Amino acid sequence: MKLIYNDGTDLQIQSASIQGDGTLLIKTVSATEEDLRGMFGDELKTRKMVISERSQTVGEYEGYTTLEGITKYTAGIIGIILSRPGETVAEKMDALIRENADLKEQVEMLKGCILEMSEQVYQ
């Protein structure tokens, strides 16, 4: 399988798939960790990536320009984790924390309204 970068260069890979958290995981044994950091850290290069096998396109990934991390597996396999800007795991967590705080505030406000209404009914 071959990954073809936006700039026309390519890299032999074992797999490419979207994970449950929305990140793109690419596995390869074709380069060193340092080389992969350089390749996948280049936003222009990773703007669009096409996966081909036997000269046929089997996948296209656009906008995965943020390098989240590199994972080492057994047998020399290296996994590259990419996300779209604004959709990194940290950004998603921050958004969820803010949303949770807003919801707690709304619940407290509603509790206050219900308490006021119940006091008015019993008066």
Image (tube, rainbow, N blue to C red):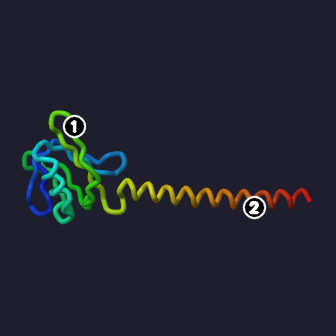
In percent of width and height, residue 35 lies at 13, 52
In percent of width and height, residue 8 lies at 9, 61
Q: Residue beneath label 2, please?
A: 113
Which residue extends farthest front? Answer: 34
Q: Is residue 111 left or right of residue 84?
A: right
Q: Are marks 2 and 1 in contact (CB under 8 Å)?
A: no
Q: Calculate the distance from the C-alpha at mark 2 to the C-alpha at mark 1.
A: 55 Å
- For image coordinates 31% across by 51% down, the residue present is 23
Q: Is residue 17 left or right of residue 114?
A: left
Q: Residue beneath label 1, please?
A: 73
The label on residue 117 is none
At numbered mark 1, what does the secondary structure look like: helix, strand or loop?
loop
Mark 1 crowdedness (10 Å alpha carbons): few <14, some 14-19, many ≥20: few
Q: Quadrant of the C terminus?
A: bottom right
* Residue 14 versus residue 99 in the image, above or below: above
- For image coordinates 50% across by 56% down, the residue present is 97
Which residue extends farthest bottom? Answer: 44
Q: Which corner quadrant of the image does residue 93 belong to?
A: bottom left
Q: Which corner quadrant of the image does residue 87 belong to?
A: bottom left
Numbered disc in front, either 2 or 1: 1
Residue type at tag 2: Cys
Residue type at tag 1: Tyr
Label tally: 2
